[in-house]
Amino acid sequence: MHVMESPPGATAVIDGREVDYFCGCGYFCLHGHPEIIDAACKAVRQFGMGSATSRSGYGDNPVLLEVERNAAKFFATESALYYVSGYLGNTILLQGLRDSYDVIFYDNESHYSVLDGIALADKPAIAFAHRDANDLTRQVARHLKPTQRPLLISDGVFPISGEIPPIPDYVDVFEQYDGSTICVDDAHATGVIGEMGRGCFEYLGASGTRLFSSGTLSKALGGHGGIIPGSADLIERLKSRSKIPFASSSPPTPAAAASARALEILQETPVLRKKLWDNTLYAKSRFRALGFDVNDTPVPIICLAGTDADLKTLPDRLLDKDIAISRFYSGGDAYSSVPEGGAVRIAIFSSHTKQQIDRLVEEIARIV
Ligand SMILES: Cc1ncc(COP(=O)(O)O)c(C=O)c1O
């Protein structure tokens, strides 16, 4: 076990040592941003840690409402719903939309939060092969009865592989079925992909009234909690049909204030996204030059897969050089979207320097 003793950033203090940090999901290094920390401190002094009641009573406070206003602005939607953890977003969507679909189709590499949402939805659920629109076509034809309405749910960016699902192909498959719905878990896409950082639908140019996404403010945004952007009607529906947001405590006030400010900062500073994409494309091109099969999307996740013994020991050997990356095992209870044989996951941040990226690539080239 390792212990992080600083905010996550391009460098972090782990086990008492400063390392070049390429792990986790703090893609803009906002968790330690002084304005975000100031916002959290100010709010906690004024409003305390939380309201000690759910939002159905007197639990709303100005900070929670500000997060939802800022999120609606960020996503250019009428409204937004803010709740305690991004993990619950899929459950809230599947519960809130339950009158609109009959059968769930889900990518078989979906994140646990998608699978848990499905388990609570109490509807038939059919898996289709990972990112495979042809298999989706087969599964829908096999399992959907006439008059039934399909709902598809998938990660918008897969957390370890960094892959993006072929949403436009799914939209084409669903076009022939009346009342179809598509939901994505954009935990790793929120703030990161799409011209304005609005996530996977924006990046892929997919739009429509039956496309829904849930995201998180805990990763790229440097705050905490889950967010669902959408129409005022959608948000009212989610509030009335899912008990999670209104029968549980809201995100703590300092986390909410941090999230509200983080949404503003990311919207006011598009150069952050530009830096992240530049760093990502640069790092990916360097890994491709080493012979790794790495995609060329702006998703700041580099997944080096393979059974090579050197890859297995890579994180420990890099840590000896004060560089932190993550290793994930496949099979059994492994994390979702880990390729067969396991993988090394490298996260790129907007504030990594070229020198840090070059040193990472060169140390890996020496070892592998
Ligand atoms: C795809 C996906 N969805 C949801 C979550 C959970 O989000 P949060 O940490 O905001 O609860 C994660 C967390 O790692 C994730 O990878």
Image (spheres, rainbow, N blue to C red):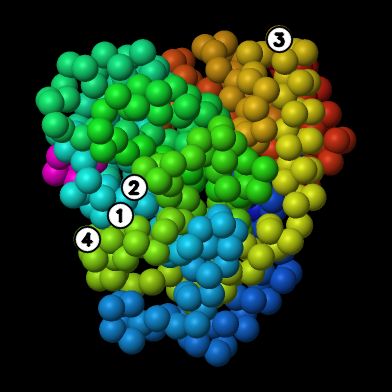
Instruction: Say whether residue 30 is magenta.
Output: no
- Determine which residue is flagged by label 4: 241
Q: Name the residue under label 3.
A: 291
- Asked whether the beta carbons under mark 1 and mark 2 sit within 8 Å of each other, the answer is yes
Are the residues tagged 3 and 1 within 8 Å (C-beta)?
A: no
Q: Name the residue under label 2.
A: 90
Q: Where is residue 246 in the image (x, y as percent from the top left)?
A: 28, 70
Labels 4, 3: front one:
4
| x then y, percent, for residue 60 | 40, 81
Q: In this view, does 62 lie above or below 6?
A: below
Main SS of the magenta part reads helix
Q: Pointer 4 and pointer 1: residues touching (CB < 8 Å)? A: no
Asked if the beta carbon under badge 2 is closer than 8 A to the nearest atom of ligand 1, the reply is yes
Mark in the foreground, 3 or 1: 1
Q: Which SS class for mark 3?
A: loop
Task: Write down the residue under mark 1.
Answer: 92
Circle nearer the N terminus (2, 4): 2
Give the side of residue 319 with respect to residue 327, left or right. Answer: right
Alpha-carbon span between mark 2 and mark 4: 13 Å
Residue 203: name its quadrant.
top right
